[in-house]
């Protein structure tokens, strides 16, 4: 059993201890290995061995250090060293961290972990994103030391049109937009009830990931409308979500981009992506009404 220095149980214990966290690791890796963007990083890896190390990492990160580890461990440096080869050879970066974080949250939610504990766990893991930002920068610097041409620069095609995601400023800008958007939504009396009993940290992570897909290139096999309908099914039925709420959200979305001084032509382009989703909310509300009859 983990015995922290004070009387308060560690986060590791409050999550359920070794058995519960081991179950989380099992599902977490299943999700990660099923993700086409992440699975290549696990080629040639011994997954059972990796799961064992992941469990030990969670023990350390969530306040249950190993008996054999008397000295404090710099978690950030530990992660940087463990992933150095992936930064250099496979282009591991913060976007992959965001995907992993999303799977981590989804795993805990699926296992019915209390939202407060999920937020606390994300509060521990979230700051480690910087490791992946710095790691990819360091790997690019290492590539520049080579005498031969840089594959990174060789792959850059200036003639290739930028995605809307890139034109908006990339991850940092979209993250800022999500923060601003949710501040507005939570302050709106008509919309805030839809976010009761919801982990805002997890929701923001999922929103960032959705915008990355929507403002880049949507995969041919990804039905955005069906995805949105499924994700909001409970809100249509239980809380009367409808197209009027979509309109208010869209207004806050535009206002958020305006606050961030996004050029009008890019705002129009973003609205052109989001706007066609309005019928999902019309149909969802209509279906919910018919179910009640």
Image: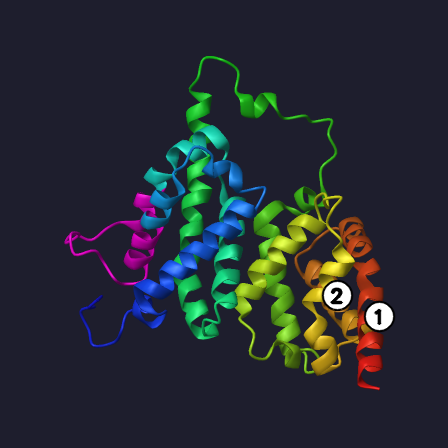
Circle 2 crowding by C-alpha within 10 Å: few under 14, some 14–19, many from 20:
some
Left or right of 12 on screen, residue 220:
right
The numbered mark, 2 or 1, whose residue comes first in the sequence reads 2
Q: Is residue 58 left or right of residue 73?
A: right
> Is residue 245 depicted above or below 74 in this figure?
below
**Residue contact at pointers 2 and 1, CB within 8 angstroms:** yes
Residue 228 as seen in the image, left or right of residue 276 = left
Q: Position of residue 54 (x, y in %)?
A: 35, 50
Relative height, residue 60 to residue 118 (above, below) = above
Verify whether residue 55 appears in magenta. Answer: yes
Tally of marks: 2
Camera-side residue of 273 and 53: 53
Q: Position of residue 256 (x, y in %)?
A: 68, 63
Q: Report the colour scheme.
A: rainbow
Residue 73: mark: none
**For residue 236, above or below residue 211:** below
Secondary structure type for disc 2: helix
Crowding near the residue tagged with mark 1, few <14, some 14–19, many ≥20 C-alpha atoms within 10 Å:
some
In the rendered view of the protein, which quadrant contains the N terminus?
A: bottom left
Q: Position of residue 241 (x, y in %)?
A: 75, 77
Q: Label 2: which residue? A: 229
Which residue, given by chain and number where applicable, does mark 1 sit on? Answer: 283
Residue 153, image x and y in percent? 57, 24
Q: In this view, which residue lies farthest toward the bottom?
A: 293
Q: Residue at x 53, y 42 (%)?
A: 38
Residue at mark 2 to residue at mark 1: CA–CA distance: 9 Å
View extreme (top): residue: 147
| Residue segment shown in magenta | 53-79
Quadrant of the drawing holding the C terminus: bottom right
SS class, disc 1? helix
Report the residue at 48% width, 73% height from top.
115
């Amino acid at each position: 059993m983990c015995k922290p220095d004070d009387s308060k149980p560690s986060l590791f214990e409050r999550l359920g201890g070794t058995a519960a966290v081991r179950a989380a690791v099992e599902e977490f890796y299943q999700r990660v290995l099923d993700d086409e963007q992440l699975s290549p990083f696990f080629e040639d890896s011994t997954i059972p061995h990796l799961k064992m190390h992941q469990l030990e990492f969670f023990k350390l990160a969530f306040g249950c250090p190993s008996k054999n580890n008397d000295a404090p461990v710099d978690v950030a440096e530990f992660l940087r060293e463990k992933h150095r080869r992936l930064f250099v050879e496979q282009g591991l970066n913060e976007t992959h961290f965001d995907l992993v974080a999303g799977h981590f949250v989804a795993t805990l939610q699926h296992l019915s972990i209390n939202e407060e504990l999920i937020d606390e766990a994300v509060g521990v893991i979230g700051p480690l994103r910087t490791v992946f930002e710095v790691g990819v920068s360091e790997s690019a610097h290492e590539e520049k030391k080579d005498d031969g041409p840089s594959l990174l620069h060789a792959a850059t095609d200036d003639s290739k049109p930028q995605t809307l995601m890139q034109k908006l400023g990339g991850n940092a800008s979209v993250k800022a937009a999500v923060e601003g958007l949710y501040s507005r939504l939570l302050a709106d009396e008509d919309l805030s009830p839809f976010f009761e009993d919801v982990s805002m940290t997890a929701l923001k992570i999922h929103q960032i990931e959705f915008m990355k897909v929507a403002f880049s290139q949507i995969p041919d096999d990804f039905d955005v409308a069906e995805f949105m309908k499924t994700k909001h099914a409970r809100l249509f039925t239980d809380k009367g979500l409808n197209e009027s709420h979509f309109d208010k959200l869209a207004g806050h979305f535009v206002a958020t981009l305006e606050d961030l001084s996004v050029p009008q032509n890019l705002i129009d382009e973003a609205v052109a992506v989001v706007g066609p989703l309005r019928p999902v909310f019309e149909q969802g509300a209509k279906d919910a009404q018919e179910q009640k009859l």
